[in-house]
Image (spheres, rainbow, N blue to C red):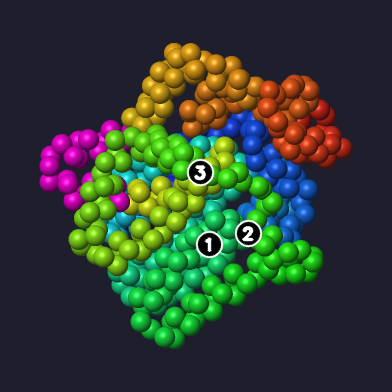
C-alpha cells in the first residue's frame, strides 16, 4: 500500500518519538540540562533576551509546568525535546518530498538525519537545539515552498517564524541574509515591506529587556564569553574537526550531498543560492566559534546537508545499487557501536574514557542514546568530584535539590 505524505509524516513522527523516548536519559544529564530543569522547576517566566537564556524555549517549559504542575520538570523537558525533534524530522521529510517528488528517498533522507549523531544526541538529552531546529526547519520549508510556488502566505509565515526563532537562539541571525535574498527574489514590494516589517519588529523586540534593565544592547548578542585569538593553525584544526563531525553524522551518505549540490545548481539556482546562503554562515560560525560543544551549532547546517543528500540520492537512483545502498541507513546505529569499540581499543581512547568516566566516559561522547546515564543530581548528592571545572552545573544542581527537598525526600530526588 502506497502511503501519502500525511500518512508518512505521522509514521515518521511516531517512529522517531518512540526511538528517542526509548533511548532518552534515565537521569538528568550533565551539561545545560540541569539549568533548563531548574528554570522549569522554579515556574517563573524569564524576561530576558541574552544568548544563554533561550527565553522562548525556557518560557515554553515554564508554561507547560504551570499547566501540568504535578509532572516532574525533567519529564516536561523530555517531552518538549522529543516532540520538537520528531516534528523537525517530519518537516525535513516534507521539504525534501517537495523538492524531489519521491517519498522513498525523502523518507530515507529523514531517517539519515534522524540518526545523525548531533541531532540524535540532542533528542536524548534536555537541550534547546531540537526546539530551535523545529523553527529553523519550518523557515526553510516555507521559503522552499515560496520559491517553488510563489504563494505569499508562505513567505509571511517564514518571516514570523524566523523572528520568533531569534528568541530561542541568537545564532539564527545567521539565516537572515538568506531570508533577505528570498524577499528580494519575490519582486513584490508590498510583500517585501510586510515580511521585512514582521521580521524587523520581532528582531527589535530583542532589545526591549536590555533597555528596561539598563543593560548594554550588545547583551542581546554576547553572553560575555571571551574567545581566544584564533590563528591560521587554529582555523585549520577547527575546519578538520568540522569535517570530522560531518563524517560522523552522515557516514558515506555525505558523498551524495556533493551530487545534490551539483544537481540543484544546474536545475534550480534560486533554491541552490537559498540553501547555500543559509548553510555557509552557520558552518563558518560554528567552525570559528570552536568551544568544547560547538558540534551542536552545526545542526541547522546538517539539515541543509541532508536536503542535498536527498536530492543526490534521488537523481542517482537510476543506478540499481543506489536504492539498495539507501537501506543501509538503518545500520547507522551500528556505526556508532563500531566506532566506540575501535576507539576503546586505543590507548588514547582508554585514557580519555578514564578522564571522562565521571559522566559516562566514551559512551557519553560516541553514542547518541542516553539510557542508563550518570546523572548530575546523584553526582551532586553523593558529593563526588569531577576532574574538570563543572562549578556552574553543580550550582544549578544544588539549587534544584534545595527546591525539591522542600516537598520530596532526598532518596527520591537522587533518582532524577
The residue to which callout 2 is attached is 221
**Extreme left residue here?**
319
Q: Position of residue 153 (x, y in %)?
A: 43, 75
- For the residues labelled 3 and 1, the Cα–Cα distance comes to 25 Å
Secondary structure under the numbered disc 2 in the rendered image: loop
Q: Nearer the viewer, mark 3 or mark 1?
A: 3
| Label 2 with label 1: CB-CB less than 8 Å | yes
- For the residues labelled 2 and 1, the Cα–Cα distance comes to 10 Å
The residue to which callout 1 is attached is 173
Q: Residues within 10 Å of mark 1 (few under 14, many from 20)?
A: some
Q: Residue at x 78, y 26 (%)?
A: 381
Name the N-terminal-most of marks 2 and 1: 1
Residue 231, which numbered label? 3
Q: Position of residue 254 (x, y in %)?
A: 31, 41
Query: Can residue 54 be seen here?
Result: yes
Q: Is residue 318 magenta?
A: yes
Residue 146, relative to residue 130: is it above or below?
Answer: below
> Please, what is the dominant secondary structure of the magenta stretch?
helix
**Extreme right residue here?**
406
Range of residues picked out in magenta: 308-330
Secondary structure under the numbered disc 1 in the rendered image: helix
Amino acid at each position: 500500500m502506497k502511503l501519502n505524505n500525511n500518512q508518512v509524516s505521522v509514521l515518521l513522527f511516531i517512529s522517531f518519538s518512540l526511538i528517542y523516548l526509548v533511548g532518552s536519559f534515565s537521569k538528568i544529564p550533565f551539561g545545560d540540562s540541569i539549568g533548563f530543569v531548574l528554570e522549569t522547576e522554579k515556574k517563573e517566566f524569564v524576561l530576558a533576551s541574552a544568548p544563554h537564556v533561550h527565553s522562548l524555549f525556557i518560557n515554553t517549559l515554564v508554561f507547560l509546568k504551570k499547566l501540568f504542575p504535578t509532572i516532574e520538570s525533567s519529564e516536561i523537558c523530555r517531552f518538549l525535546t522529543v516532540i520538537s525533534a520528531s516534528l523537525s524530522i517530519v518537516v525535513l521529510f516534507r521539504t525534501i518530498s517537495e523538492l524531489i517528488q519521491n517519498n522513498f528517498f525523502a523518507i530515507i533522507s529523514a531517517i539519515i538525519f534522524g540518526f545523525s549523531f548531533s541531532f540524535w544526541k540532542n533528542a536524548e538529552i534536555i537541550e534547546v537545539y531540537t526546539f530551535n531546529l523545529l523553527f529553523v526547519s519550518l523557515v526553510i520549508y516555507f521559503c522552499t515552498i515560496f520559491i517553488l510556488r510563489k504563494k505569499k502566505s508562505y513567505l509571511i509565515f517564514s518571516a514570523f517564524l524566523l523572528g520568533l526563532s531569534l528568541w530561542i537562539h541568537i545564532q539564527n541571525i545567521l539565516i537572515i541574509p538568506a531570508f533577505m535574498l528570498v524577499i528580494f527574489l519575490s519582486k513584490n514590494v508590498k510583500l517585501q515591506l510586510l515580511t521585512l516589517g514582521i521580521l524587523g519588529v520581532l528582531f527589535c523586540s530583542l532589545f526591549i529587556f536590555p533597555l528596561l534593565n539598563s543593560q548594554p544592547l550588545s547583551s542581546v548578542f554576547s553572553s560575555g564569553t571571551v574567545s581566544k585569538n584564533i590563528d591560521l593553525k587554529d582555523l585549520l584544526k577547527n575546519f578538520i574537526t568540522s569535517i570530522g563531525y560531518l563524517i560522523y553524522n552522515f557516514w558515506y551518505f555525505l558523498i551524495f550531498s556533493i551530487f545534490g549540490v551539483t544537481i540543484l545548481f544546474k536545475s534550480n539556482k534560486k533554491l541552490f543560492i537559498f540553501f547555500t546562503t543559509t548553510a555557509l554562515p552557520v558552518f563558518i560560525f560554528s567552525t570559528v566559534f570552536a568551544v568544547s560543544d560547538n558540534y551542536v551549532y552545526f545542526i541547522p547546517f546538517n539539515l541543509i546537508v541532508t536536503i542535498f543528500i536527498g536530492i543526490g540520492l534521488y537523481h542517482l537512483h537510476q543506478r540499481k545499487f543506489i536504492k539498495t545502498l539507501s537501506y543501509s541507513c538503518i545500520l547507522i546505529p551500528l556505526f556508532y557501536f563500531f566506532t566506540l569499540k575501535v576507539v576503546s581499543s586505543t590507548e588514547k581512547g582508554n585514557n580519555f574514557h578514564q578522564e571522562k568516566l565521571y559522566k559516562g566516559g566514551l559512551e557519553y561522547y560516541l553514542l547518541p542514546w542516553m539510557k542508563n546515564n550518570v546523572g548530575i543530581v546523584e553526582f551532586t548528592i553523593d558529593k563526588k568530584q569531577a576532574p574538570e571545572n563543572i562549578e556552574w552545573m553543580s550550582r544549578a544542581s544544588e539549587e534544584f535539590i534545595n527546591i525539591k527537598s522542600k516537598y520530596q525526600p532526598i532518596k527520591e530526588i537522587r533518582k532524577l
